[in-house]
Amino acid sequence: MSDLFPKDSWYALGGSAALDAGAVSPACLFGEERVVWRGEDGASHVWHNQCIHRGMRLQYGFVDQNRLSCRYHGWRFGGDGKCAYIPAHPDMIPPDDFCVPAFPSVESDGLIWTTAGEPGDSPPDLSDFDNLAFCRSLIIDADPAGVARAVSGLESARPVSNGVTAAALSTDETLVLAVQPLNDRKCQLHILVSSTSADTPATRHKCSAWARKFRWQVENNDIPQPAPQAAGGQETTR
Ligand code: FES
């Protein structure tokens, strides 16, 4: 994976509002499968997407109050990833090492963030963006580094953090674009919009239309590349 996407960084997995209480969803980061789920208490969790018993993908499980139940033999795992109940042995207290590997799950600015490493701090602070609203996520069939380069070539683009860039949508609307590297051939782009006025359906519609066009351009190598800069910051002419 490109140096643009260090594992010791935070990456968005999707919009917080898209994950209802009791929902279970598959996810991927750097080619590693994850399961994302939300308990009835509202807490979100990001785990390795494999049951420790017989390897069933946990994405097919279901939420039982604040535990995730594997679909195969019904082992229940608490929010800390530890197995809390085994239906075939109802009187058994599962040992502490019966535990699904869990990753950080932090929700801020309308997104669920996680990491594949040890970022050591909190997800990017997007509080400088007024009226920031999550718009949508979409998968792009292109390598994450290429998508990041295309994003950095957008009008008024400026980096916010690893994989996160702000760019102009219009004179009073700013896109905040978070790239989630799925693997080395595919990524997911999470799109938020900040505007000087309140969030409206029209703004989101415009944002969504922009996203579909951007995806088409990237997947078809139709993105204008930034003009090369000569020494002193002047654009080259020929
Ligand atoms: S494979 Fe998950 S409980 Fe058996």
Image (spheres, grey):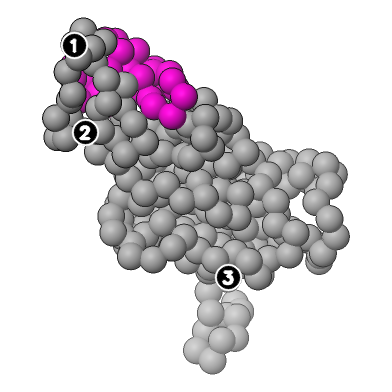
Measured as percent of width and height from the top left, residue 127 is found at 63, 66
Reply above or below: 179 against 118: above
Which residue is located at x 48 percent, y 33 percent? 38
Assign a secondary structure to mark 3: strand
Residue farthest to the top? 88
Label 3, on which residue? 158
Residue toward you, 103 or 14: 103
Q: Which residues are magenta?
A: 50-75
**Mark 1 Cα within 10 Å, few/some/many (few <14, many 20+)?**
few
Q: Residue 156 in the image: x percent, y percent?
A: 66, 70
Residue 81 among magenta residues: no
Q: 197 left or right of 207?
A: right
Q: Which residue is mark 1?
A: 89
Residue at the image position 73 percent from the left and 64 percent from the top: 130
Q: Which residue is mark 2?
A: 99
What kind of secondary structure does the magenta stretch mostly adopt? loop
Q: Mark 3 or mark 1, which has the lower sequence index?
A: 1
Q: How many angstroms separate mark 3 from mark 1 (CA)?
A: 56 Å
Name the spot of residue 206 as percent of width and height, x first.
78, 45
Does residue 237 show up?
yes
Disc with the residue nearer the chain's start (1 vs 2): 1
Question: Disc 3 and disc 2: Cα gap in Å?
Answer: 41 Å
- Can residue 220 be seen? no
How crowded is the residue under tag 2: few (<14 C-alpha within 10 Å), some, or many (20+)? some
- Residue 51, percent from left and from top: 25, 23
The residue mark sitting in front, 3 or 1, is 1
Q: The C terminus is located in which quarter?
A: bottom right
Q: Is residue 47 left or right of residue 45?
A: left
Q: Amino acid at mark 2?
A: Cys
Q: Amino acid at mark 3?
A: Arg
Task: Give the structural element (helix, strand or loop) at label 1.
Answer: loop
